[in-house]
Image (cartoon, grey):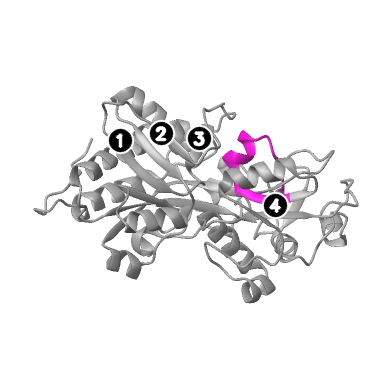
Amino acid sequence: MRHFIRSAAVAIAMATASTLTLSAAWAADISGAGATFPYPIYAKWADAYKKETGIGLNYQSIGSGGGIKQIKAKTVTFGASDAPLTGDDLKSSGLAQFPMVMGGIVPVVNLEGIKPGELVLDGPTLADIFLGKITNWNDDAIKKLNPKVKLPDQAIAVVHRSDGSGTTFNFSYYLADVNADWKSKVGVDKALEWPVGIGAKGNEGVANNVSQTGGAIGYVEYAYAKQNKLTYADMVNKDGKKVEPTAKAFSAAAANADWSSQPGYGVILANQAGAASWPMTSATWILVYNKPDDAAATAEALKFFAWSYAKGDKMAAELDYVPMPDKVVKSVEEMWGKDILDKDGKPLYSGM
């Protein structure tokens, strides 16, 4: 893992609207759509890239399901998803897939008098809350995990994603791994039949709903918790250790990942072993065509991704994302040279 310093969160110009547009009128946009999980860092990278190159990014933060649909419909140059496509799906669709950055999913709550990191949850208890089996904040299961916290006698208001979401995929993957009832009754997918709760669109929507609803609990990418000053919960991980959501904890979960073990680098990082590992860690992936109709647009997108790999680590660390390891970046860029080609079979990327 490349060395980076975890620094305090910085203020970023991140609208809660669903579309990021950073482009000059005379410059060709790089168009993409999909996951809301990486939106804060894509916004930050795009702003810096535009200042350096004059090339803008039009990114629709509409959820992983929407991003997959749009790239398959060829309405954008790239799709973005936190739920990796299978090897068969990639092959049949003619798509290449690669990871861009990693981060953490955190439970966020709205409880008067409770500070960030003061509340502790574990996987089985979190699953029972989202199953509707635990309905009050002073339930014995929560009190057992928080003997020194003054928990209110207050109903739990569950907030979940309403759109097709890679964040939901990774969240539900974790819950299914730690709770048999969740696995059998709800399962794992980008969109679910939720037993309880109210739906909200995007990480932005969940963050907003939790911040406005007393007694609420939801799940968001950590940058959204920081941006919206939400109260997050610490977690008990697979090794039985209480951990805070930090870049160091996300990095620990990814430390032993074998990225070459799955087609399209589709490794799931949920519930990894290790005393320091955050249990809800996830990568986020980019999807482009192996032989795109608009080769010039895809080549421009690859330049942006290469720039982000090369120059975006510090910006990622400032938002508590984890940059991809050097060896993974090298492998991805080699894959671009072999697999992403123009109509004449020539590589669209030949290095920065």
- In the displayed structure, does residue 301 sit left or right of residue 42? left
Q: Earlier in the sequence, mark 4 or mark 3?
A: 4
Q: Earlier in the sequence, mark 1 or mark 2?
A: 2
Q: Residue at x 76, y 65 (%)?
A: 132
Q: Which residues are magenta?
A: 217-233
Q: Gap between marks 1 and 2, in whole Å? A: 9 Å
Kindly indicate the quadrant of the structure image that contains residue 55: top left
User: As shown in the figure, which amino acid type bears the numbered disc 4?
Assistant: Met
Secondary structure, mark 2, is strand
Q: Position of residue 138 (x, y in %)?
A: 88, 55
- Residue carrying label 4: 235
Q: Earlier in the sequence, mark 3 or mark 1?
A: 1
Q: Residue at x 52, y 32 (%)?
A: 14
Asked if residue 299 is among those painted magenta in the image, a careful observer would answer: no
Q: Position of residue 222 (x, y in %)?
A: 60, 43
Image quarter hosting the C terminus: top left
Secondary structure, mark 1, is loop
